[in-house]
Image: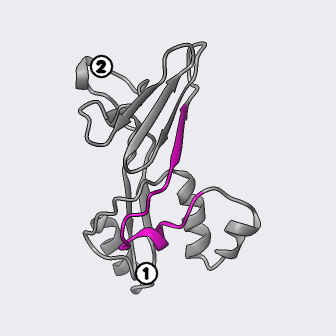
């Protein structure tokens, strides 16, 4: 991300810009003996989310739970249209507001519907993670548990 920002500034005469780097969720890669993306363990459900730019503290880590829904709110905020977030009733919060702030206890939702007859869902905040696989008993984890 730093390399891309330096190249941008070099070619664009140092115009200010906010950067967001993210992707879809992770992959188990053999963790817990599992492969693929079809679990709500952190290795699979977590997403990389990096934000950089003017007014965003460098190398800071924000412990607030975030979701990909926050990206649209961030883009609207970055282009000066933050009023549209509430006007349109969009889910999410601007990452520009969350960056560098003390952790907020937000609840976020993740859902998986890609293949198979049954979906699964996760509700998560800083302390708890509730996972429900359709047709199976629900699971509740705390952030201090090994199974998070």
The residue positioned 56% from the left and 13% from the top of the image is 135
Q: Is residue 82 above or below residue 142?
A: below
**Magenta region's main secondary structure?**
loop
Q: Is residue 17 left or right of residue 113?
A: left
Q: Nearer the viewer, mark 2 or mark 1?
A: 2
Q: x, y percentage for residue 28? A: 31, 28
Q: Are marks 2 and 1 in contact (CB under 8 Å)?
A: no
The residue positioned 48% from the left and 73% from the top of the image is 97
* 67 vs 145, nearest the viewer: 145
Residue located beneath label 2 in the image: 34
Q: Is residue 30 above or below residue 126?
A: above
Residue 110 colored in magenta in the image: yes
Q: x, y percentage for residue 102? A: 36, 70
Q: Is residue 7 left or right of residue 113?
A: left
Q: Is residue 54 left or right of residue 72?
A: left
Mark 2 or 1 closer to N-term? Answer: 1
The quarter of the image holding the N terminus is: bottom left
The quarter of the image holding the C terminus is: top left
* Marker count (numbered): 2
Q: x, y percentage for residue 29? A: 27, 27
Q: Is residue 104 left or right of residue 145?
A: right
Residue located beneath label 1 in the image: 12
Q: For the magenta stretch, what is the residue range?
A: 92-111
The residue positioned 45% from the left and 84% from the top of the image is 15
Q: Is residue 30 visible?
A: no
Circle 2 Cα neighbour tier, 10 Å, few/some/many (<14 / 14–19 / ≥20):
some
Q: Is residue 138 visible?
A: yes
Residue 14 colored in magenta in the image: no
């Amino acid at each position: 991300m730093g390399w891309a920002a330096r190249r941008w500034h070099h070619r664009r005469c140092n115009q200010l810009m906010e950067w967001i780097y993210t992707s879809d969720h992770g992959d188990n890669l053999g963790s817990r003996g599992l492969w693929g993306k079809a679990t709500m363990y952190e290795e699979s459900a977590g997403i990389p989310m990096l934000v950089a730019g003017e007014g965003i503290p460098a190398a800071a880590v924000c412990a607030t739970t975030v979701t990909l829904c926050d990206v649209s709110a961030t883009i609207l905020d970055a282009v000066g249209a933050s009023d549209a977030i509430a006007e349109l009733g969009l889910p999410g919060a601007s990452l520009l507001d969350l960056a560098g702030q003390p952790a907020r206890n937000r609840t976020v939702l993740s859902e998986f519907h890609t293949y198979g007859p049954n979906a699964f869902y996760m509700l998560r905040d800083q302390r708890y993670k509730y996972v429900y696989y359709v047709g199976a008993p629900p699971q509740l984890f705390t952030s201090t548990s090994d199974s998070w």
